[in-house]
Image: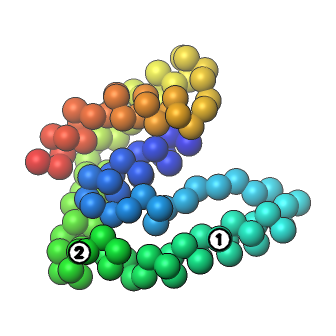
Amino acid sequence: MGMDALVKTVLKQVGIREERYSLQWASAAEAPRFVQLITEFTSEMKELGPLGHAEGIEPDELKVRLQKALEVVSSQKVRISYGNATKAMRKDAVWTREYISEVINTKMEKALTSAFT
């Protein structure tokens, strides 16, 4: 769930709607749930249209932003910051999406802000 929060934060930074990313869990025994999740996500993506369309981002600008996002998440500073955030989460042992998102955003704010400037 920590990676989920990080991806959503990075998408937000580059101006891509976070609805374009979804991380859900379905076991092998939950085929109907898996089908439902995929069907719902596909429907949402069809409504949003091609990547960048709903966001109002031109294709050339989209490429630049996606490249920047890749550089940011690949940077050593951001990866170390993420590791420190996950240590804090394990120490606190609170596993709700809200708490994890809060920790990721708080612990990684400085690293992400400097990486995007």
Going by the numbered disc 2, the residue's amino acid type is: Ile
Q: Which mark is residue 20?
A: none
The vertical placement of 23 against 99, above or below, is below
Residue 91 position by quadrant? top right
Asked which secondary structure carries label 2, the reply is loop
Q: Residue at x 36, y 47 (%)?
A: 9
Q: Residue at x 23, y 74 (%)?
A: 57
Q: Which mark is residue 40?
A: 1
Pointer 2 residue: 57
Quadrant of the drawing holding the N terminus: top right
Crowding near the residue tagged with mark 2, few <14, some 14–19, many ≥20 C-alpha atoms within 10 Å = some
Going by the numbered disc 1, the residue's amino acid type is: Glu
Q: Residue at x 23, y 36 (%)?
A: 111
Residue 81 position by quadrant? top left
Asked which secondary structure carries label 1, the reply is helix
The vertical placement of 17 against 101, above or below, is below
Q: Position of residue 42 (x, y in %)?
A: 59, 77
